[in-house]
């Protein structure tokens, strides 16, 4: 089975469209989003509508989705995120709200776990520090857990016997990274709609469950159009400019 795993689309329709164009010529069996379809960007409804029409697409709940669904409060949101959320909420239809409310907190299948934040706190925990990775690696039974939330693509590898661990930032596209038996992994798939690793190209991940090979794929998209739509909605300027820089 070939999976495409994405996360943190954040209402960026132009980035989502570029990813889906790529999928057309590089088909997969399943597309899974690790949450946060909405927030920050200008096109929450268009993103949800597009994604719901894809038969092999599934999504779990991110913290921005959970706010819109009335499941969590906006604790931890900065002013820009709050302003963007207020605008996003005005752009969603009743069907969109129903879809966001229906999202599960996790998916487990084929020895893979998918969550937004972490296995411990599925919607809200940020995994940046080695200690947090180590604590979380014991909290799931699958071989690999795919996460989003931080918008920083990386691979955390933990050796079951020795307890040795390593965290690899994804500086370049890793065409083939093979997951090894006896080791467990947390893979952050980065962000489609608001990359924060000093690269403006959208980030996506492909995983083959048979060969256990993992690859990261960066793709350019029409950033100027996404920014234009945000300006028309008078969204915070920093949210607009950061797209071109990737921070
Ligand atoms: Fe996010």
Image (cartoon, rainbow, N blue to C red):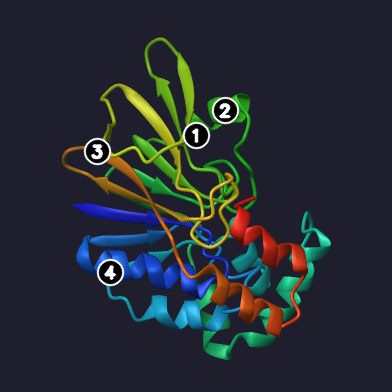
Q: Which residue is mark 1?
A: 139
Q: On the image, numbered disc 2 is attached to which residue?
A: 135
Under circle 3, the secondary element is: strand
Give above or below for 117 relative to 18: above
Between the residue at mark 3 and the residue at mark 2, the CA separation in whole angstroms equals 25 Å
Label 3: few (<14), some (14–19) or many (≥20) C-alpha neighbours in 10 Å: some
C-alpha distance separating marks 4 and 1: 28 Å
The residue at 49%/42% (across/down) is 153
In the depicted structure, whether residue 7 falls above or below residue 48: above
Q: Which mark is in front, 3 or 4?
A: 3
Q: Is mark 3 in CB contact (under 8 Å) with mark 4?
A: no
On the image, numbered disc 3 is attached to which residue? 213
**In the rendered view, would you say 90 is above or below 150?**
below
Q: Residue at x 43, y 60 (%)?
A: 220
Can residue 27 be seen at all in this image of the molecule? no
Tell me if 209 is positioned left or right of 164 in this view.
left
Q: Quadrant of residue 51?
A: bottom left
| Residue furthest right as drawn | 79
């Amino acid at each position: 089975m070939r999976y495409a795993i994405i996360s943190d689309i954040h209402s960026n329709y132009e980035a989502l469209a570029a990813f889906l164009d790529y999928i057309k010529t590089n088909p997969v069996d399943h597309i899974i989003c690790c949450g946060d379809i909405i927030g920050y960007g200008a096109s929450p409804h268009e993103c949800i509508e597009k994604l719901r029409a894809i038969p092999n697409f599934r999504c779990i709940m991110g913290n921005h989705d959970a706010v819109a669904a009335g499941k969590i409060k906006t604790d931890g949101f900065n002013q820009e995120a709050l302003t963007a959320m207020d605008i996003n909420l005005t752009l969603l239809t009743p069907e969109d709200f129903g879809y966001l409310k229906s999202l599960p907190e996790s998916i487990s299948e084929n020895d893979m776990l998918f969550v937004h934040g972490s296995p411990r706190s599925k919607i809200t925990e940020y995994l940046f520090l080695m200690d947090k990775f180590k604590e979380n690696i014991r909290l799931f039974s699958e071989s690999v857990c795919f996460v989003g939330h931080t918008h920083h693509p990386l691979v955390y590898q933990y050796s079951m016997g020795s307890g040795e661990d390593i965290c690899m930032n994804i500086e370049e596209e890793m065409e083939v990274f093979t997951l090894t038996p006896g080791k467990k992994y947390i893979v952050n798939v980065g962000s489609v709609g608001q990359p924060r690793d000093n690269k403006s190209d959208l980030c996506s991940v492909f995983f083959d469950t048979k060969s256990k090979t993992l690859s990261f794929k960066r793709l350019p998209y029409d950033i100027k159009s996404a920014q234009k739509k945000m300006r028309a909605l008078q969204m915070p300027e920093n949210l607009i400019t950061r797209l071109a820089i990737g921070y």
